[in-house]
Image (spheres, helix red, strand yellow):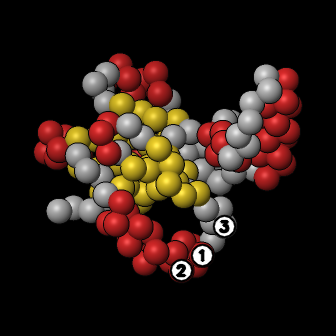
Amino acid sequence: MSWINWKNNSARCIRDYSIYTKEQLDGHREEITKLCEATNSRAYFHQARRDKHKVKYKMLECLTENIIHNKHSLSWIYRTACWHKTYSEKIWIIDLDDWWADRYEEVRLYINTKLRPEKEKVITTLETVNWKHLITSPFDLKSFKEDYPEVDVHRNNPTLLYYNKI
């Protein structure tokens, strides 16, 4: 999980946490809110669980690269490892801006019924700065993009956890 400061259109990570359960996330919620409000930041998190073995191997790869290229900072290694394909399950984010409000239910039903009807694909919906993120399991992306080419689908990206709505 990362807290990002977007001041001057320059993103930088303020703090990272490894959170393993919903209870741990709930335990940090007040701290997250205060940190975001104090630094005018947004909190993001990866929906997809990370595989600890993949993360460790990616960290070793990053450390080796650090030694070979004589880099001095090590603080980026864990964050970098988590951004790579170290997930244990695939979670996609369908980014719907407010101009999709009148077609939200249409898009949700399309994903759940037409793309792989054997099970519901939409896991949850989260509020964002511009409107909503549909959090889904993978589906037939090619068919979706044919019918909804203007909708952004993010794979292996974090989603917004908190922002100050003021």
**Helix, strand or loop at disc 1?**
helix
Q: Amino acid at mark 1?
A: Gln
* Quarter of the figure with the N terminus: bottom right
Q: Which mark is residue 27?
A: 2
Q: Residue beneath label 3, please?
A: 20
Separation of residues labelled 1 and 2 (CA atoms): 5 Å
Disc 2 + disc 3, Cβ < 8 Å? no
Looking at marks 2 and 3 on the same chain, the residue that comes earlier in the sequence is marked by 3
Q: Which mark is residue 24?
A: 1
Residue at image location 79% in from the left, 52% down from the top: 52
Gap between marks 2 and 3 measured at Cα: 12 Å
Q: State the residue in front, 116 or 86.
A: 86
Are the two marked residues, 3 and 1, in contact with CB atoms closer than 8 angstroms? Answer: yes
- Position above or below: 81 against 126: above
Viewer can see residue 159 = yes
Q: Is residue 163 left or right of residue 15?
A: left
Q: Residues within 10 Å of mark 3 (few under 14, many from 20)?
A: few
| Callout 3 amino acid | Tyr
State which quadrant residue 99 falls in: top left
Q: Secondary structure at mark 3?
A: loop
For image coordinates 83% across by 46% down, the residue present is 56
